[in-house]
Image: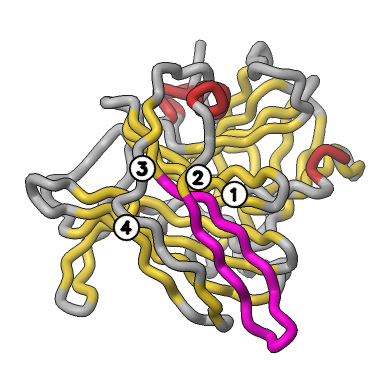
């Protein structure tokens, strides 16, 4: 599963780096965000993806190399403390290869890599950021680093004004966190307690009875994607087959303060492994996701 995304290069405290991924979520009343960086950005990496999976209040943050079929990351437990601070406990990633194959549409043969070193449990305040090495190349010293920031409380619904316009590369990518989906005004109960997060240049959701919807901010008429909706702040809306869908997240879905057109492809025949009513994913190029 290939991920084609633009490369952002910045100068940060003397270290040149590239942004690979961003995300956020909330567990046990503690909200957090993460940003994944490649330090330094050369040589660039491709064909990677990942996100978070929350099981029994444990965040399983994973990043995957689709060329070598290697996966690395960490488990994270978070708890609010009586003094207003937060306990962050990190440990080795515990996603099984079988679960990884399920997450990434039956791509199997995964090897789980250990962390370069296990970070200590930390007591943090809202606004604090922890830098965590996910992978270090012993030959070059190049690192993949997660910067985890404590947000504190739960997010709130955001909006945006103005007419929606097409996405430009400079403006970022889609990110969906803790979604609540309504169809023709009725809440899909399977999303009522969903605290997951996905992000990438294209994202998708599966809804039982409707198949898989693939979304892009960039116009992709060459793939048969139709301009069928829009993003405003933390809300994604679209129409398909006479139905109206509205997905509300707990964070802004598209970077920046604008409203954006959304291009949609529906694979009505898609069925995930298992009997899930709702599922979402990201990290793949639109070309790889769209099936004709």
Q: Is residue 45 left or right of residue 196?
A: left
- Per the rendering, the mark at residue 51 is 2
Measured as percent of width and height from the top left, residue 211 is found at 69, 21
- Per the rendering, the mark at residue 133 is 4
Q: Circles 2 and 1: CB distance less than 8 Å?
A: yes
Lower position in the chain sequence, tag 3 or tag 2: 2
Measured as percent of width and height from the top left, residue 87 is found at 60, 72
Disc 1, SS: strand
Q: Is residue 259 left or right of residue 179?
A: left
Up-down: is 226 above or below 171?
A: above
Q: Is residue 138 left or right of residue 167?
A: left
Lower position in the chain sequence, tag 3 or tag 1: 3
Report the residue at 70% width, 79% height from top. 81
Up-down: is 71 above or below 1?
A: below
Mark 4 or 2, closer to the camera: 4
| Residue picked out by circle 3 | 114
Alpha-carbon span between mark 3 and mark 1: 23 Å
Lower position in the chain sequence, tag 3 or tag 4: 3
């Amino acid at each position: 599963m290939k991920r084609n995304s633009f490369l952002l290069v910045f100068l940060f405290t003397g270290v040149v780096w590239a942004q690979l991924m961003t995300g956020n979520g909330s567990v046990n009343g503690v909200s957090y965000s993460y940003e994944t960086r490649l330090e330094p950005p050369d040589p660039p990496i491709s064909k990677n993806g990942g996100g978070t999976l929350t099981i029994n209040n444990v965040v399983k943050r994973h990043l995957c190399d689709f060329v070598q079929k290697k996966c690395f990351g960490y488990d994270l437990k978070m708890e609010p403390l009586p003094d207003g601070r937060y306990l962050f406990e990190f440990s080795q990633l515990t996603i099984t290869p079988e679960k990884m194959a399920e997450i990434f549409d039956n791509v199997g043969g995964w090897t789980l890599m250990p962390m370069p070193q296990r970070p200590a449990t930390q007591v943090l305040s809202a606004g604090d950021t922890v830098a965590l090495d996910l992978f270090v190349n012993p030959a070059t010293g190049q690192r993949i680093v997660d910067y985890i920031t404590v947000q504190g409380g739960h997010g709130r619904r955001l909006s945006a004004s103005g007419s929606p316009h097409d996405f430009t590369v400079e403006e970022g990518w889609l990110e969906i966190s803790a979604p609540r989906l309504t169809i023709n005004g009725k809440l899909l109960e399977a999303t009522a307690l969903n605290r997951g997060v996905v992000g990438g240049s294209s994202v998708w959701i599966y809804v039982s009875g409707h198949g898989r919807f693939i979304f892009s901010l960039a116009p992709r008429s060459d793939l048969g994607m139709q301009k069928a909706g829009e993003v405003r702040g933390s809300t994604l809306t679209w129409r398909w087959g006479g139905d109206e869908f509205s997905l509300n997240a707990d964070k802004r879905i598209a970077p920046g303060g604008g409203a954006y057109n959304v291009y949609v492809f529906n694979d009505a025949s898609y069925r995930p492994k298992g009997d899930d009513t709702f599922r979402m994913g990201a990290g793949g190029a639109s070309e790889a996701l769209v099936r004709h």
